[in-house]
Image (tube, rainbow, N blue to C red):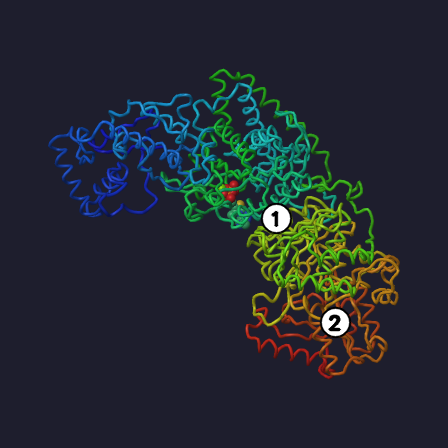
Amino acid sequence: MSQLRLLPSWLGARASRLLAPHDVQMFNRPSRSSGPPATFPSGKRGGSSSYMEEMYFAWLENPQSVHKSWDSFFRKANEEATCDPAQPPFPETRPAVSSRTETSKLVEDHLAVQSLIRAYQIRGHHVAQLDPLGILDADLDSFVPSDLITTIDKLAFYDLREADLDKEFQLPTTTFIGGSEHTLSLREIIRRLESTYCQHIGLEFMFINDVEQCQWIRKKFETPGVMQFSSEEKRTLLARLVRSMRFEDFLARKWSSEKRFGLEGCEVMIPALKTIIDKSSEMGIENVILGMPHRGRLNVLANVIRKDLEQIFCQFDPKLEAADEGSGDVKYHLGMYHERINRVTNRNITLSLVANPSHLEAVDPVVQGKTKAEQFYRGDAQGKKVMSILVHGDAAFAGQGVVYETFHLSDLPSYTTNGTVHVVVNNQRLCPFFLLLQIGFTTDPRMARSSPYPTDVARVVNAPIFHVNADDPEAVIYVCSVAAEWRNTFNKDVVVDLVCYRRRGHNEMDEPMFTQPLMYKQIHRQVPVLKKYADKLITEGTVTLQEFEEEIAKYDRICEEAYGRSKDKKILHIKHWLDSPWPGFFNVDGEPKSMTCPATGIPEDVLTHIGEVASSVPLEDFKIHTGLSRILRGRADMTKKQTVDWALAEYMAFGSLLKEGIHVRLSGQDVERGTFSHRHHVLHDQEVDRRTCVPMNHLWPDQAPYTVCNSSLSEYGVLGFELGYAMASPNALVLWEAQFGDFHNTAQCIIDQFISTGQAKWVRHNGIVLLLPHGMEGMGPEHSSARPERFLQMSNDDSDAYPVFTEDFEVSQLYDCNWIVVNCSTPANYFHVLRRQVLLPFRKPLIIFTPKSLLRHPEAKSSFDQMVSGSHLSPAKVWLKRYPVQPQIQSWGTSFQRVISEDGPAAQAPEQVRRLIFCTGKVYYDLVKERSSQGLEEQVAITRLEQISPFPFDLIKTEAEKYPGAELVWCQEEHKNMGYYDYISPRFMTILSRARPIWYVGRDPAAAPATGNRNTHLVSLKKFLDTAFNLQVFEGKTF
Ligand SMILES: Cc1ncc(C[n+]2csc(CCOP(=O)(O)OP(=O)(O)O)c2C)c(N)n1
Ligand SMILES: [Mg+2]
């Protein structure tokens, strides 16, 4: 709120407030900018009292510190004031009224009033009383905009005078402060503007480019009497505050030395979230997906999601045993899913809170992806049934880039969730009074953000931002109700900034007095919001003291009883904390229904049909580019010859899954065409702007839908989004493709915290597929390596344990691992691994290193034979017959081959073979070429490892045993400290019982993944290929 400084009488006379005396607070608010401005006022700041005050105080302290024009001004004014104290020393800027016509004055005054109204709408929030402690600035700035009428002298800014205050003015159509009145006195106009924009609600919305939306907000907040609550509503609000507050008190009493990241200081968040949910339910929402950090999470689980209290309380017992495999997670990270009746609307509502890691804001895109998927599966394209709510901490909201990335998905057709309500728990501000700080952890907010508010990031998507003083529960409830209405009217994001404080430290074990003693003395004096609100309702007669006390006693009893029951719980089932249950997918115990995977081959006629559609334009009068016609002719030709390249194999995999009712979604940068211009899943009419066709959606009349979408240029946000999408249903193939594999590292948080560890922590399976273009092709250190070593290092299969080869070894190994890492060398195997991903009776993340040059390599082709179901005698099946380790596959048709063994001359006489080279991916083709050029087909066998992790111990053992006299070599094109070597080496040792060495052939260790010099690239390639076929090189070496 506007402030009055201690001025000399001649300044003070001008500065008497227009408003009620309680608005006037007598203390200084230093400006954010250091030191006083150095020049004489001019332009819009001329005559501004706050500016002048700054100057005056600075001048008083040291006349040299201000510009000399100010110095002489104050000297002169002082002299004049000494002569005639009644006379203000300010020069009169306004020309005499008599010199103007009455009409022009009328027009000018009306224009001035219009500007004044607009000034409040734009800048009123800067002086709103947002801080519950009454000492802080939510925008880190004590500056009072000069165009707000905080003191009478500011009327001069608009060329208005005190005498104008009681004149009536016509109200413009851009304000609703008049209600049914069209004119108001200037005094009343200012009073109503102050009451709308400068009290406990601060509105930021005038940057929105849509007039209708601005009008809507103005109407919601400006209309007189909008914030009136029935006594029923007030009692509900009080009861919700009781629950919120007493829940934290209860935990604090029972477990005083436990971390729980309590909500104290922002207890109003519980009624706030409940209001958003109530209002949304009233407007038709049936499913709400929430994401939030640690603070207040247990309270949200208890009082918003309504998780059984004993399930929460039992987690404080250190002796609680875990029923599920995996690491589990701390209580304030777990997710939850609950269907119930909304008591206010009496409608069904499903609430889920998505499990999240400690990494703040990482869950945001995940929540959005899950929300999008739920909308998609319900056919809720407009988001009328499903919505998301994201809760943020102020420091994280301002500091984490993923917040921005997530906002940028909010209006993209394939990523929009049709509006999210964001709630910021804003407990961190600068305290100029004590020059002390309230903190994120221990950081001064001025050091933590460059933007005035922590919420400014939301402005990029034109989301309105409603700041509200969290100690005024009714203001909070009103704002939340409008926010929910906004989301459900315009289907756009909106932010509620709950300006609050933290009664304790960062967590309950933190001592805030270490770093902010005076601030916390002040906080400890602060009357809790519940008491303040209860007192208000008791005073106004809405509730009696007895009713209030009974409400408290009732909830305390509920907690005590639940606490009693919680002591009986000895085992924690994290399965009961799933945020996304998959009904029917697992058996009743949550286990896979089988430990087998059907063969992934498909009938030949299905392959042919998909090939034909892939090479056609299914729409009439649709003209495609001639270059594309050539590509489609190529596909038709391959289909006729029953062969596939990489792109066509992918088509076959996707198309066949669609036929089986599996939704396929492929997302990433430029995925529609494919980074390497090989995919072309979206055809563009060359003559009609924006007319497109996705042939994959024209395969069969009753097929599942195919979504292919170019994403924004984000990895963290988009991968998180797709992960959330894959979370919603097991019956989908959700793929994210990196433009080049190395770009996944800007999404590392999603990979580390969710993909590799998610199941272990939260029991939630996830079948997301990452397509990471990878390969050393002389393109330089960037764009070459998708960093397989990183994924392999995080694989959890034991390098030193000799496995037991049971009949279901292949599938159970997949079940036990944290993710599957493959590098396919043939299109057919790529086809199979994509299909296997969905046909498995459980879900695992799948990381595929995908090719670049192999996309067009003449040898990198597969035949239908390698992809069909049934009794074809394909080379794959010949191989399987010879090494019958996969009985179910043998009888059902072709499948993914974890290892592709040598099938040339060396395999005919394995005992003659002198070297067996194991490799993975594209280097296979270089090796085959080199072997042929050296005529070593009989002496050297080459075996491809297609599934790197979990390591196919069984097949590698068989391969090694097949060539008893051969030296074993691992060859890779990546540098020695990268790629696969460190992963495969100990596993080879285990399976070979350390009886035979596995020699390394490849590039030397290096810091960068690849050279930037093409010639160096070729030289190093030749060098390691020479070594690979130098049969003497390891002679006499020991291991
Ligand atoms: C990405 C990330 N960086 C750092 C942390 C460590 N950390 C945990 S809470 C916290 C302060 C968060 O402040 P804010 O977002 O304002 O939430 P508050 O605790 O004030 O509610 C920090 C830095 C984290 N959890 N995640
Ligand atoms: Mg904070």
In this picture, is 467 found above or below 932? above
In this picture, is 1018 found above or below 568? below
N-terminal of the two: label 1 or label 2? Answer: 1
Tag shown at residue 721: 1
54 and 671: which one is in front?
671
Residue under label 2: 918
Q: Quadrant of the C terminus?
A: bottom right
Q: Secondary structure at mark 2?
A: strand
Residue 127 image offset from top left, x and y in percent: 37, 35
In this picture, is 1039 found above or below 6? below
**Res 495 seen here:** yes
Give the side of residue 336 with respect to residue 21, left or right. Answer: right
252 and 23: which one is in front?
23
709 and 306: which one is in front?
709
Residue 610 image offset from top left, x and y in percent: 75, 56
Q: Secondary structure at mark 1?
A: helix
Residue 852 image offset from top left, x and y in percent: 64, 66
Q: Gap in Å between the C-alphas at discs 1 and 2?
A: 37 Å
Label 1 is placed on what type of residue?
Answer: Phe
Give the side of residue 209 with respect to residue 823, left or right. Answer: left
**Res 500 seen here:** no
Q: Residues within 10 Å of mark 2 (few under 14, many from 20)?
A: many
Tag shown at residue 681: none
CB under 8 Å between callouts 1 and 2?
no
